[in-house]
Amino acid sequence: MSARPIANTRTAAGMPTGKLAVWWLIASEIVIFGGVLGSYIMHRLAHDDWAVQAAYTNTWIGAFNTLVLLTSSLSAVLAHQAAESGDGKKAARLLYATCAGAVTFMIVKAFEWTTEITHGFTITSSTFWSFYYTAAGIHAAHVLVGAIIMLIVASAAKKGRDLHHVELIGLYWHFVDVVWIFLFPLLYIAK
Amino acid sequence: MAESIPASHGDHEVGHHEEQGFVSKYLLSTDHKVIAMQYMFTGMAMAVIGGFFAYAFRMQLAFPGMDVPGWGLVTPNDYNALVTNHGAIMIFWVAMPVLIAAFGNYLIPLMVGCDDMVFPRLNRLSYQIFLLSAIVLMASFFVYGGAFGGAWTMYPPLSAKAEYSLTQLGSTIFVLAVALEFVAFLMGGINFITTAMNSRAPGMKLYDVPMVVWMIVVASILFMASVGPLIAGAIMLLFDQNLGTAFFDPDRAGDPILWQHLFWFFGHPEVYVVLLPATGIVAEVITTFSRKKLLAYRTILYTVFGTGVLSFTVWAHHQFVAGIDPRMAHVFTVTTLLISVPIAEMMFVYIGTLYGGSIQYTTPMLWALGFLVTFLIGGVTGIFLGASGADIYFHDTYFVLAHFHYTFFPIAIIGTFAGVTYWFPKMFGRMMNETLGKIHFWGTFIPFNAIFLPLFYLGVAGQHRRIYDYSAFPELAQYQDIRVFATSALLVMLAFQVVFLWNFFHSMFRGEKAGANPWKANSLEWAAPSPPPHGNFPDGLPECHRGPYEFSHPDREEDYWPQNQPA
């Protein structure tokens, strides 16, 4: 492991290096989801009959998960606030709360998918369901990875180390949230 | 700048003076220069493989059915796998790693005057993933069914359905390798952009940044902004191949054209992703060896930004024949012809820089001038293909093939040689042999034109691409002499690469000592010793006092004025 290079400590662009990098990471993720959702929307506009398939998705479960994710973002913001004031222990507790939101989201999702698959709506049933599982699946992978990184950040913050990481993981978490805000109406509400 | 350079630099040095073994020094290093070399040597090895593939299928085209020395009989499946992987390797595993990753890694920290990339370990990880992707790609040649042969563009249904491609495993591995490579370059790109934005030397304003750094940064941004849809598409294609989804299957309400949109939305900006670093290298070389200030620095920058924005609006010119709405084809014809304007402007500015300069015909300068000449031909022939009416005739002929080799060869080969010969003294502390360098230049430049100029003629004569043996087509079989000529020129060109390899490795150990600034250039990398030690600037990180192109300033005796020299 090498020492932190001086390059990392400079801020010629007026923003800490880590934060700048996270913004660029989010920029690159936006186009990935943009590709999936753009393809989905183009397909959807050309196939009115997908509405029949979409009618089988469970809007209430989707709405509940939206609520869970948005609430978990609140605790991420509060964690950032705590980290700013130097209270690493409180920040860690709030990040754990966010992780709990992520876990709830994943459990509900697992329950939802199991029900759908046992009712015969699998990834190969139709192109709508292919998009449904692919888009939500890529998003779920982001939730999972985000939660794991959040646990690492939280355990460091608890010992008062790398408090600035709390803000960075928060940025990422809000992005994951925003993606879901696009997915929810596109996959669940538009019938 | 809040940092205190000498003090923090001293601390930094302490951590790095213990002896390192070979593995930790060269294989697991986080030093940007070592990682740059790893990218460069991997890229060179892949170029040898890609060149060997070209040799094998060109031999088959010239002498159909003959046992090719070194490969054996090229079967139709071999032929498809060879052309597919030649294309993919040369773009994703040669042009990208060498032009962006190797030069980006080597030059950005040195040229902006700092000690390393902002995220050295991320940098190392990006190389390791890249290396893995290359190994995965090569593995596809050894699996059941053989390597993927459906062209580097992976169009479904050929790529999606095993019953068409006959390479279930090969197709999947190919897509996986490309996806891994993208992940590596996304990490690298974030590192490049952040380093250039944040770690500039005290006093270095945006317009003091050397052109090649700008170009690599803009190229990385273009890559990041364009690759997302293809990553999404790659996931969808992998699902189509292995889970039985039907995203791209027209029989089951999928759309194969969707893939072409996703692919070329990335694929066309990708041309500029590799073009820009090459033009950046050429800008540095031309200015230094004209001993003249780079003409219109800001104009070049604006043309780069213009090219970047426009490059997202041209992709559907690849689908003129695939069945897009003719009205849309009109729009894409206009945008495609428009993008030649900023690039042409850039060419004029480079020629304007040469005008009135005291030109030194060193080896890097020859490569840079060779770039202008050949890329010009590539650009001009692109106009024919961008116009939808003409493209219907030219589509998928050797005219297209010759066109994009006249763009990619100057970019990936000529531009790279310009950069390698120019920065070699910095990289290894020794000079390359000029005579051998010039022999290698002419031995590459002339055969290159001899290979591809005749292919324009073949294309206009109607020779379709992707045909394994033309002797079955009477109206095309008559051009066999031209095919033999092109293949012979290729053999000559490949033979001359031995001169380069010898010059490269011999000069690395036995060349004349270079000194810190052998070309008397201005940018900050020349302020570091050659080769730069870990941490780059042992006498403290430099400060920047002026732009990088102050050559032949009237008030000065010397004809150059380094950026770090106080006024």
Image: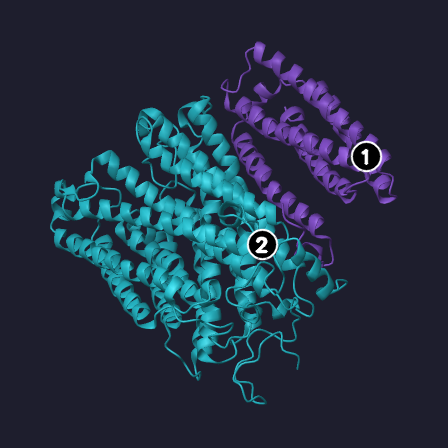
Residue that protrudes farthest toward the front in the picture: B19
Quadrant housing the C terminus of chain B: bottom right
Which amino acid, by three-letter code, is at mark 1? Answer: Lys
Tag 1 residue: A158
Please say if B11 is above or below A172: below
Quadrant housing the N terminus of chain B: bottom right
Which amino acid, by three-letter code, is at mark 2? Answer: Phe
- Percent across and percent down for residue B219 are 52, 55
Tag 2 residue: B192
Query: In the rendered picture, chain A carries what hue?
Result: purple
Label 1 chain ID:
A
| In the image: residue B363, left or right of residue A1 | left
Disc number at residue B105?
Answer: none
| Residue in view at x 29 percent, y 55 percent | B402
Q: Secondary structure at mark 1?
A: helix
Q: Which chain is cyan?
A: B
| In the image: residue A158, left or right of residue B348 | right
- Percent across and percent down for residue B407 are 37, 58
Q: Nearer the viewer, residue B56 or B166?
A: B56
| Residue in view at x 50 percent, y 77 percent | B520
